[in-house]
Amino acid sequence: MNHIKSVFKASDGTRIPYHSWEIRQGGYGRIAIVLGDSYTRIEENRRLVDFLLENYFKIYAPLIPEVNPEERASGGIDEFSLHFGSFRSFLEEKEKKLKMVPFVFSVSVLPFLSYYFRVLPPFKRMVFFSPVLDFREKPLNTSLLFKKRVGLSFEDDMLSEVEDERSAIRRILIENPTISKRLVRDMRREFDDFPGDYPLDVVSARIAVYYGEFDRLVNINRLELLKESLKNARMEMHGYPRMKHFLFYDKYWKRMLGDLKIFLTEQ
């Protein structure tokens, strides 16, 4: 397995670090773009990395400044879209015609949806883990006054009830993670009436959502509204009993990956 950490220069000159993994040179047939969960580092999620490599993906994980929990950048949705779009263009040039599948976690899902609805890039499949779709609620239910970055709240009940899994995630949690205040403000305005007034009937991608049924950060009503609004897209939701926010550090993570493999391989 080859793991590289490098830096990409976006069209506005911003330097964006990213991780990439491949099982061997040329030993892949698809590209996974992973936007992490903001509470942990992607390189710590060996279960996801190993799964994607075993299923012939090459993995790219850009640390987009606006949602990178260890950054100080203060851009809004325009900056997020520029940075993610620049990285996508970079991959399209680098990897030519290979299909790309975004795998998006937690608070990164709403900004990603804004980018996707605006641009409609040719993603045929997308995967969302524990999506946070309301930036007025936890973990972002805070005032934005006098801030450049907004802290993500954390509570013990976000963790698995399985002690081994709780211990594993506790060891890798980022201390005091943040995201850009302007991004939070933009998402509150743009999605106040979720899912907004985008022409969603033109969306034809297949979407899979994976969440824990005990995850208090996941707004099921908003997921249902999104599903109902995607008239020509196929969106499937997979909820897992007693699982919470960190799906890869919870009791039924192997079952979840079994469901994900079906989604990625079925025609």
Image (cartoon, grey):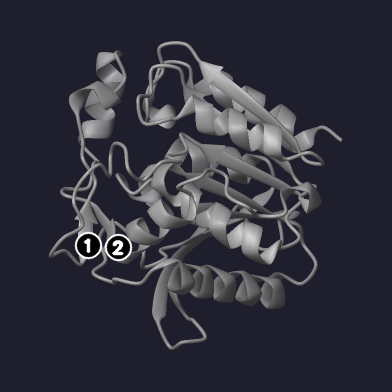
Residue located 78% across and 35% down the image: 265
Left or right: residue 168 versus residue 1 is left
Residue located 58% across and 37% down the image: 51
Q: Is residue 133 in view from this perspective?
A: yes
Disc 2 crowd rating (10 Å Cα; few below 14, some 14-19, many 20+) is many
Q: Position of residue 139 (x, y in %)?
A: 28, 39
Nearest the viewer among 166 and 244 is: 244
Q: Dot 1 corresponds to which residue? A: 149
Q: Position of residue 242 (x, y in %)?
A: 40, 12
Nearest the viewer among 178 and 161 is: 178
- Asked if disc 2 and disc 1 are in contact, CB closer than 8 Å, the reply is yes
> Where 206 falls versus 35 (above or below)?
above
Q: Which image quadrant is residue 259 in?
A: top right
Residue located 43% across and 28% down the image: 247
Q: Could you tell which of marks 2 and 1 lies nearer the N-terminus?
A: 1
Mark 1: amino acid: Arg
Q: Which image quadrant is residue 209 in?
A: top right
Left or right: residue 181 versus residue 64 is left
Tally of numbered discs: 2
Mark 1 element type: strand
> Where 109 falls versus 92 (above or below)?
above
Q: Position of residue 44 (x, y in %)?
A: 36, 45
Nearest the viewer among 87 and 190 is: 190
Mark 2 element type: strand
Q: Dot 2 corresponds to which residue? A: 180
